[in-house]
Image (cartoon, rainbow, N blue to C red):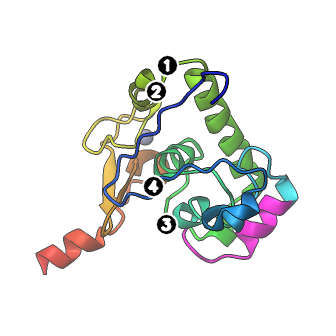
């Protein structure tokens, strides 16, 4: 960059999905040409309509970049924990305006906590703010329950049974398969 400014990009997974493009119109980048409105700027009506039109699990819908852009695996875990919602709740049964408030709150706090940090410190700072993400087996800071986890083929989600599922454990299909 002409200004001498730069940035670091890191990717925790093994899928190598990360990419950087510098364009004037995002339609030029096929991977995000169809991305939905940004999570911090989507209006309540648009968000409500997006949820009302889906019977998919709310965890899946929050991470669907074509519906709402910008929420990844970590922050969807944190948002659902703060909202006290089961990750498996059907999207069309969720109180959309209340969830949108929580999205703004959690992402807004994250932005504040990470603002101006040197890139090398962002990852650790992010982790410190997480209540449930990446914390399976640890104690929920809100209710004291043990954080639980559901694993998929290539990722996992963490949640607090005490805060989010009325104490019930969600079914872990990978574990169920292994136990059969
Ligand atoms: Zn809890």
| Closer mark to the observer between disc 1 and disc 4 | 1
Cβ atoms under marks 4 and 2 closer than 8 Å: no
Q: How far apart are marks 2 and 3 (CA)?
A: 29 Å
Q: Can residue 166 be seen in this view?
A: yes
The single residue placed furthest to the bottom in the displayed view is 180
Position of 56 relative to 105 (above/below): below
Q: Is residue 33 left or right of residue 65?
A: right
Taking the spot 34% from the left edge, 43% from the top edge, the residue there is 134
Q: Residues within 10 Å of mark 3 (few under 14, many from 20)?
A: some
Taking the spot 32% from the left edge, 40% from the top edge, the residue there is 135
Q: Give the range drawn in magenta.
A: 46-57
| Closer mark to the observer between disc 4 and disc 2 | 2
**The label number, if any, that marks residue 88 in the structure image:** 3
Taking the spot 64% from the left edge, 68% from the top edge, the residue there is 30
Cβ atoms under marks 1 and 3 closer than 8 Å: no
Judging by the rendered image, the residue that carries numbered circle 4 is 166
Taking the spot 56% from the left edge, 28% from the top edge, the residue there is 6
> What is the quadrant of residue 101 in the picture?
top right
Judging by the rendered image, the residue that carries numbered circle 1 is 118
**The label number, if any, that marks residue 122 in the structure image:** 2
Q: How far apart are marks 4 and 2 (CA)?
A: 33 Å
Q: In which quarter of the image is the C terminus?
A: bottom left
């Amino acid at each position: 960059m002409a200004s001498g400014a730069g940035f670091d990009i890191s990717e925790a997974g093994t899928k190598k999905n990360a990419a950087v493009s510098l364009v004037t119109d995002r339609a030029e980048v096929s991977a995000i040409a169809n991305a939905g409105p940004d999570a911090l700027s989507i209006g309540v009506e648009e968000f409500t309509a997006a949820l009302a039109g889906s019977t998919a699990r709310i965890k899946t819908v929050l991470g669907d970049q074509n519906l709402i852009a910008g929420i990844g695996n970590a922050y969807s875990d944190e948002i659902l924990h703060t909202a006290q919602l089961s990750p498996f709740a059907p999207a069309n049964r969720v109180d959309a305006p209340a969830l949108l408030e929580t999205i703004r709150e959690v992402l807004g706090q994250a932005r504040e906590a990470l603002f101006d940090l040197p890139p090398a410190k962002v990852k650790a700072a992010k982790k410190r703010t997480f209540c449930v993400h990446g914390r399976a087996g640890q104690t929920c800071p809100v209710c004291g329950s043990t954080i639980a986890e559901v694993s998929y083929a290539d990722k996992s989600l963490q949640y607090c049974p005490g805060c989010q599922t009325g104490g019930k454990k969600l079914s872990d299909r990978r574990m169920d398969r292994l136990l059969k």
